[in-house]
């Protein structure tokens, strides 16, 4: 029989003390309804955009996300847009970066690219051959698309550390061009889970990898995942302890979401894989909160844990989420600017053809009206800000979320999910456990998560990133 550890026992005690079993279904966590709030409207809620008809650009862009849609295989739970490539044959990635240059020139003719924050995600950006990476970053510098003070992050897959000469050269190039932070897909330290989910690596790489990164002065984030089938409390506790032991600067904890069209979704649908119920999922979540807090990490604000950041109680939002802008770059990238949620084409062949004929990469988009933007700002402020500042909303929209959504906030306070003090609406520790589910209560009734149409339906289903929680009429 497995012995309950103090961490698991405390998490179970908190689960009962918070009365998480009493939450309505729409606030109970499960991988099939769950969605990691990073895009709204969801991909299928965006409208097809004809070439030349893309949403109006802002005057300048300071944030860019570059999607590298290549991996050495496909992890069981992955729903990101990518194709599998042989890591020894990476010429396709170098050619893809040539197209990305064309795309950036296209944008630069329409907006001022003065990038202060650059994020390489994927896919697996660490599969880029070093020569291609250097050529690409030199191009950005030569064109003056990067601000001299640029900071950046690049995602690394564990297999990156297998070839020391390649990784050493790659990291030196990054550092020389101002990309000083990496995010490592550590995920779990359970070898059985790594094998069963087709992660294509073991857990033993991380100690050596961390010394390697620290010797070159990189800031390091570790990505962890929980809510996987057969992920026991003991297994998750080991992952948390191992992750903390590596002393990364930050840790991101992701709850598993299962989109239609993924292999995992099919296995669940056929009854071959059983996903953990709400109690188990939230007990793992509580274990993460307890373990990371005890190790000196602060949740800033939800699912992202950092240390050495000062006192989070003094943090406040400086602007509304809609004031931020991120240019999506590459096939399968999505972003937001000027009240428009946009997505580039999720098709490498079509992306290449568009770049060859100097056409827009934007595939789908939606420009939100004032009311829709108000709803979206509430959702993202809940997810990403230290609290909702009603004063910011009043000056932008001439109305306050507290008054506009009075009946919802009354119920959220009754459930002890938020507190209200003057103009500030803050998630409680209990509310932090279901932030996405709470955010979804503020969906705009006029924005439907439309189903896909025609040939695009499979792509949209697989990469929709949309909530499917049942509505609550509060
Ligand atoms: S490495 Fe990341 S992006 Fe690639 S298949 Fe796995 S989860 Fe998806």
Image (tube, rainbow, N blue to C red):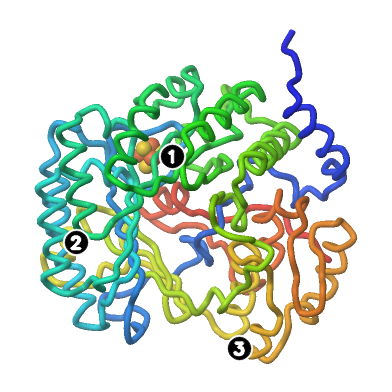
Report if the CB atoms under discs 1 and 3 are less than 8 Å apart.
no
Q: Is mark 1 within 8 Å of ligand 1?
A: yes
Which residue corresponds to mark 3?
396
The answer to whether residue 380 is above or below residue 417 is below
Q: Secondary structure at mark 3?
A: helix
x%, y% of residue 300?
59, 57
**Left or right for 140, reference 445:** left
Q: Residue drawn 51% across and 21% down?
A: 190
Q: CA distance from mark 1 to mark 2?
A: 23 Å
Which corner quadrant of the image does residue 99 belong to? bottom left
Disc 2 crowd, CA 10 A, few/some/many (<14, 14-19, 20+): many
> Which labelled disc corresponds to residue 285?
none
> Which labelled disc corresponds to residue 78?
1
Which corner quadrant of the image does residue 136 belong to? bottom left
The answer to whether residue 157 is above or below residue 60 is above
Q: CA distance from mark 1 to mark 3?
A: 37 Å
Q: Secondary structure at mark 2?
A: helix
Q: Residue drawn 51% across and 43% down?
A: 260
Disc 1 crowd, CA 10 A, few/some/many (<14, 14-19, 20+): some
* Ligand 1: quadrant of the figure: top left
Whether residue 271 is visible, yes or no, is no
In the foreground, 457 or 397: 397
> Which badge, 3 or 2, comes first in the chain's sequence?
2
Which residue corresponds to mark 2?
100
Report if the CB atoms under discs 3 and 2 are less than 8 Å apart.
no
Q: Secondary structure at mark 1?
A: loop
Specify the quadrant that holds the C terminus: bottom right
Q: CA distance from mark 3 to mark 2?
A: 35 Å
x%, y% of residue 69?
29, 48
């Amino acid at each position: 029989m497995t012995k309950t550890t103090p961490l698991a026992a405390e998490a179970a005690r908190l689960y009962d003390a918070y009365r998480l079993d009493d939450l309505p279904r729409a606030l109970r966590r499960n991988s099939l309804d769950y969605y990691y709030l990073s895009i709204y409207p969801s991909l299928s809620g965006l409208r097809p955009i004809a070439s030349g008809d893309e949403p109006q650009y802002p005057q300048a862009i300071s944030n860019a996300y570059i999607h590298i849609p290549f991996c050495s295989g496909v992890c069981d739970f992955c729903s990101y847009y990518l194709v599998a490539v042989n890591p020894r044959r990476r010429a396709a990635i170098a050619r893809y970066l040539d197209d990305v240059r064309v795309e950036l020139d296209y944008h630069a003719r329409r907006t001022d690219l003065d990038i202060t924050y650059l994020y390489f995600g994927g896919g697996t950006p660490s599969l880029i051959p070093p020569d291609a990476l250097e050529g690409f970053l030199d191009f950005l510098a030569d064109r003056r698309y990067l601000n001299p003070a640029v900071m950046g992050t690049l995602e690394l897959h564990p297999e990156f550390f297998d070839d020391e000469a390649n990784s050493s050269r790659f990291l030196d190039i990054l550092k020389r061009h101002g990309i000083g932070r990496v995010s490592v897909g550590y995920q779990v330290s359970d070898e059985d889970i790594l094998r069963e989910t087709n992660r294509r690596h073991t857990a033993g790489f991380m100690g050596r990898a961390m010394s390697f990164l620290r010797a070159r002065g990189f800031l390091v984030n570790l990505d962890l995942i929980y809510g996987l089938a057969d992920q026991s409390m003991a297994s998750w506790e080991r992952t948390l302890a191992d992750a903390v032991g590596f002393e990364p600067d930050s840790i991101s904890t992701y709850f598993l979401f299962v989109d239609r069209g993924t292999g995992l979704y099919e296995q669940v649908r056929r009854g071959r894989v059983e996903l953990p119920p709400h109690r188990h999922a939230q007990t793992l979540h509580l274990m993460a909160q307890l373990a990371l807090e005890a190790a000196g990490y602060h949740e800033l604000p939800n699912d992202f844990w950092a240390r050495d950041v000062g006192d989070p109680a003094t943090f406040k939002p400086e602007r509304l989420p809609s004031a931020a802008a991120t240019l999506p770059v590459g096939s399968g990238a999505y972003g937001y600017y000027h009240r428009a949620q946009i997505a580039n084409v999720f098709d490498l062949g079509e992306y290449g053809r568009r770049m060859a004929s100097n056409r827009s990469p934007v595939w789908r988009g939606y420009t939100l009206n004032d009311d829709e933007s108000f709803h979206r700002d509430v959702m993202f402020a809940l997810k990403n800000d230290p609290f909702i500042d009603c004063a910011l909303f009043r000056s932008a929209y001439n109305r306050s979320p507290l008054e506009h959504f009075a009946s919802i906030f009354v119920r959220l306070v009754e459930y002890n999910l938020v507190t209200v003090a003057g103009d500030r609406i803050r998630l409680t520790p209990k509310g932090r456990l279901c932030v996405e589910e709470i955010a979804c209560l503020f969906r705009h009734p006029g924005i439907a998560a439309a189903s896909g149409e025609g040939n695009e339906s499979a792509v949209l289903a697989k990469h929709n990133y949309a909530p499917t929680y049942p509505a609550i009429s509060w």
